[in-house]
Image (tube, rainbow, N blue to C red):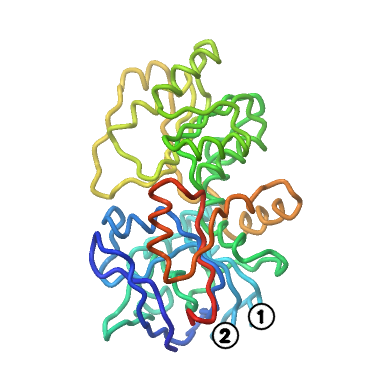
Amino acid sequence: MKTKGALIWEFDQPWSIEDIDIGDPRKNEVKIQVEAAGMCHSDHHLVTGGIPMMGFPVLGGHEGAGVVIETGPGVEDLAVGDHVVLSFIPSCGKCPSCQAGLRNLCDLGALLLAGTSVTDGSHRVQAGGKDVFPMTLLGTFSPYMVVHQSSVVKIDPSIPFEVACLVGCGVTTGYGSATRTADIRPGEDVAIIGVGGVGISALQGAVLAGARYIFAVDPVAWKREQALKFGATHVYETIEEATAGAAEITRGGMAKKVIVTVGQARGEDVDTWLGITAKAGTCVVTAMGSLTDNQATLNLSMLSLLQKNLQGTIFGGGNPHYDIPHLLSMYQAGKLNLDDMVTRQYRLDQINDGYRDMLEGRNIRGVIRFTDADR
């Protein structure tokens, strides 16, 4: 079918709205009418080259929610009319990683940047006579998509699409970073470094886990104000100010758990993150760095002598098929504030405005809401 999509044809160029062709569902695939797509910082890494796909053009977008409109042979547990969230991490449930309980590390994830179908290795999207590489096997910056069932999670149809799309990446990643990877316990002190969509989700996880003090760090004053509304107890403009403040408030104990959710992780900053981390504490690096950044600065002696832990995480260590509906049920129960995370909604042709707002610190999360004009 013919539709539209937001593409980039080379690094450091704006998103371009162009006509694209999407194939029909094959074995174990479904076609989805996408209703809303979250604008995550990771898609901006496609533009800068920090996360390079295997080729150009690239169809962006990896947070999305919509409705199943067609199913291919062999599809189970999904039917036409189902409301769904797209998980940027596929989860087959059968590979060794999934069987070991690491469904966020499903072996199908090896194909995330390849841009080819899980089913048969083919390119399912074309533009201008060329094969297109969709972000993380999805490409939610288009009002339609064909995707393998392992990346699709059925949800309650009463949940608004603009809210539901957030749990396909940002909310689940941030919340899980706090409650699962960092394993925050009641009474522990926590630092959240960077309070965009993922950081605010981590902050909410820390609140619900019973953290005592929550130190939120962000250079943007408006985001610091939002952090206080979402439950931070103290906010700081810089990590240096936060380290000094935490030292005073905790009488030198520092933050038992530190979660790094900045827009781009840089190896040169690792030691500053460990500096606010307590003895025997854990620093969780959730933020994505450039694939070309392979140097980190840290004091190895202090890492050992103070028995600190430096931990990476993807998707917050979660299980897409469990955590996505679970978090949305918490939203329905009024325990998780997702409505206020959606700062602005945009048309597809406003995508560059949305990313400009994100980079300039005006959004917690911008969402593309598709209309008939986009289809």
Q: Nearer the viewer, residue 265 or 315?
A: 265
- Residue 227 percent across, percent down from the top left: 56, 37
Lower position in the chain sequence, tag 2 or tag 1:
2
* Front-lying residue, 69 or 360: 360
Q: CA distance from mark 2 to mark 1?
A: 9 Å
Residue in the foreground of this view, choosing between 96 and 244:
244
Crowding around mark 2 (Cα neighbors within 10 Å: few <14, some 14 to 19, many 20+) is some
**Residue 219 place in picture, x, y as percent:** 41, 35
Residue at horizontal 25%, vertical 43%?
293
Q: Position of residue 132 (x, y in %)?
A: 32, 76
Residue receiving disc 2: 70
Quarter of the image that includes the N terminus: bottom left
Under mark 2, the amino acid is Glu
In terms of secondary structure, where does tag 2 sit?
A: strand
- Label 1 belongs to which residue? 81
For residue 331, above or below residue 279: below
Looking at the rendered structure, the number of numbered marks drawn on it comes to: 2
